[in-house]
Amino acid sequence: MARREAPESARQQPEEEQDRGPVEIAIVGDLTDNESDLTDRLLGVEPGGECTIYFDSPGGSPYCAMSLVTLLRMRDIRATAVVTGECSSAALWPFATCTRRLVTPYSVFLFHPMKWQSEEHIGIREAAEWSRHFADLERDMDVLLCDLFGRSADLINEWVRGHRYVTGREMAAAGLAELVGLEPLKFLAAKD
């Protein structure tokens, strides 16, 4: 999933290795299914370091999304997001956390209210507590998403309530990302 492994310390790495550019990480598929690997990859980026994260994910667990957001923020990782396909649902939170967000005209984003899913047989008290917790979690996550995007809740909440598919062009027009073509990205090329 990564172009190269992150060094233990950039000072210990040969100079030609340091000039290869930031670590590249792919978030492909369900976040939850890949949580361990994604966490490991982010921990491989030096605190305060840079990486490029490629997104093609329908989402997953909001807890997994929060874990990735927490790692990016608390470790002060400057991540550039590139949406190569889909970035939907819970994948929106780590995407919004990136300091630079690149999308193509073909990138797709699904905004929707959080969905409660349980595959367990639970009692009425546990279900009631989960329902209370879920309502708080949904409200807090909606506020956080707007904060991460640096945008007031108007447009984002409208998209969420409408279960809206949003294009890369629309994300750029809303000021939430930069629209790029399908040409090579110069900042990814190895430095001379």
Image: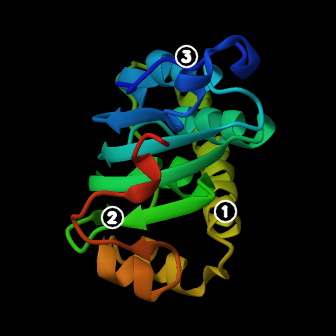
Image point 32% across, 34% down: which residue? Answer: 30
Q: Position of residue 101 (x, y in %)?
A: 49, 63
Crowding near the residue tagged with mark 1, few <14, some 14–19, many ≥20 C-alpha atoms within 10 Å: some
Q: Quadrant of residue 67?
A: top right
- Whether residue 56 sits left or right of residue 156 in the image: it is left
Q: Secondary structure at mark 3?
A: helix
**Residue 106 vertical placement versus 171 (above, below):** above
Crowding near the residue tagged with mark 3, few <14, some 14–19, many ≥20 C-alpha atoms within 10 Å: few
Crowding near the residue tagged with mark 2, few <14, some 14–19, many ≥20 C-alpha atoms within 10 Å: many
* Outermost residue, front side: 192
Mark before the other along the chain sequence, 3 or 2: 3
Q: Is residue 115 visible?
A: no
Nearer the observer: mark 1 or 3; the answer is 3
From the image, tell me which residue sits under label 2: 109
Image point 63% across, 58% down: which residue? Answer: 99
Nearer the observer: mark 3 or 2; the answer is 3
- Residue type at mark 3 is Asp
Image point 77% across, 41% down: which residue? Answer: 76
Q: CA distance from mark 1 to mark 3?
A: 23 Å
Instruction: From the viewer's side, name the closer residue of 103 and 185.
Output: 185
Q: CA distance from mark 2 to mark 1?
A: 16 Å
From the image, tell me which residue sits under label 3: 40
Q: Secondary structure at mark 1?
A: helix
Residue 148 is marked as 1
**Residue 172 vertical placement versus 33 (above, below):** below
Q: Are marks 1 and 3 in contact (CB under 8 Å)?
A: no
Q: Quadrant of residue 110?
A: bottom left
Mark before the other along the chain sequence, 2 or 1: 2
- Whether residue 185 sits left or right of residue 84 in the image: it is right
Considering the image in quadrants, where does the N terminus appear?
top left
- Residue type at mark 1 is Leu
